[in-house]
Amino acid sequence: MDAELIAWILLLRLPRASTRLRRRLIEQRGSACAALEAIRHEALPGMDRATREYARKPDARVLADEQWLLARPSRRLVHCLDPYYPPLLKALDDAPLALWVDGDVAALLLPQLAMVGSRNASRGGSELAHDFAVQFARAGLTITSGLALGIDAAAHRGALAAGGKTLAILGCGLAQIYPAQHRTLAAEIAANGALISEFPPDTPPRAEHFPQRNRVISGMSLGVLVVEASLGSGSLITARLASEQGREVFAIPGSVHHPMARGCHALIRQGAKLVESAQDVLDELGPLARSLHGALLATRDSHSPEPRSESPAPARSKLAAVSKPTPRALHSRPAGHGSHLLAAIGHDPCDVDALIEYTGMPLAALVAELLELELSGHIEVLPGGRYQKIA
C-alpha cells in the first residue's frame, strides 16, 4: 500500500482534530502526506501536542485499517480528493473527509434515491417499499438506505430483486455489520452495489453515529422518500437534513389511524411531495438524475478519467424520458452562490466542459450548483448534457 493512502488512514485517526481543519490542511498542502508532515513538524493552530504525537507514533489501529483494506480487492478508502467521491456529498460543508467502501466503487457516482422509514414497519409498508424500489431500480436509480430493519431492508431487497444497484450507509464500521441479522443482506449489497461508512472498520454502532450516517444518506442522493414513519422516527431527521441540503423530500401518506403514517403526514404538511406511485418520484427526479449522470459522463475522460459508471443504457433512456418536474421541498431553497455560474451559462446552450473553463469551478461544486439552479427554475437541461438559462 502506498504512503499516500497510509497518510490518509492516519489523518482519519487523528485525535481531537476537526474534519474541517484536516480538509483545509490537505487542500493547502496538496496531499495527505504533505499534510501529515506539517502536523508532525510544524506548530499548527488547532493541532495540540497529543495530535502531533499521534501523527508521529500512530497506534495499531492504523495497521488494522490497512489490513482490512488489503483483505479483499472490493475494499477501498475513497477520500475527498478521489474522483470516486460522490459529487453531491462533496459539495456539503460537513461532508466526511473519506468513505470506507466495500463493493462497486463506481456505484457511488450513480444517480441515487434514498428510501428510509420505520424499523417497525408494517407488512404493507415493507411490501410498498420493496415494490417501489423495484420500479426505481428498473428506471435507473440507485437505491440508498441505512441497512436498518424494516423499510431500509425492504428497499435494499427491492433494488436487488430488480437487478439494480443499492448502497447501504452504516452507522458503524464495515467490520461491525449492524444489525447482525443483516450480514447476509450486507454481503448481497456489497456484491451488487456497496457498503459505505465514514467510520473506521472497527467502529462499533453508537447512538450518536446514526444522525451522522443520515446526513450521508441524504447528501449522496437526489431526494429522500419516507415510506413509513412515526412522529419520533429517525427517518424525519433524514428528511430534515435532506431539506437543509436542498434535496427533494417525498412522503407516502397512510391511514389517519396508523401511527406509522403520522410522520409522513407531518412531512407533507411541511411541504414534502405527496407520493401515490413510483412515477410521482420519477417525474420529479428524472431530469435531475439525467443532469448529474450527463455531467459526470461529459467530463470523466478529460477531468476524471478513472471512474467508469456501469449504469445500463435502458435505465438511462427511461430516466431521460420522464417530464421536467416542478420543484418542491420542505422549505424554500437557499439562494446559494449560483449567480456567477448563472451568468456564465447565459441564454446560449453550453456544456459542462465550457462551464468549467469559464468559471474555474471543480466538477463536484459545479454539478451541485447546476442542480440547485435547475431546481429553482433558473436553467433548463437540454439534450446532450447542455444547459441554458430560462428567460
Image: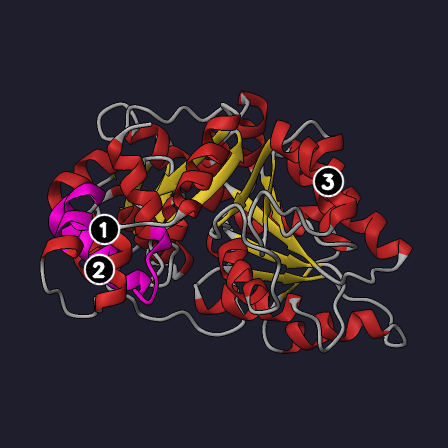
Q: Which residue is mark 1?
A: 56
* Residue 25 among those drawn in magenta: yes
Residue positioned 50% across, 61% down in the render: 215
* Residue 134 among those drawn in magenta: no
Q: Which residue is mark 2?
A: 52
Q: Earlier in the sequence, mark 3 or mark 1?
A: 1
372 horizontally vs 175: left or right: left
325 horizontally vs 7: left or right: right
Q: Earlier in the sequence, mark 2 or mark 3?
A: 2
- CA gap between label 2 and label 3 equals 38 Å
- CA gap between label 2 and label 1 equals 6 Å
Regarding mark 1 in the picture, which secondary structure is present there?
Answer: helix
Figure coloring: secondary structure
The spot of residue 201 in percent (x, y) is 52, 45
> Of circles 2 and 3, which is in front?
2
The quadrant in which residue 166 appears is top right
The spot of residue 323 in percent (x, y) is 54, 44
Q: Amino acid at mark 2?
A: Arg
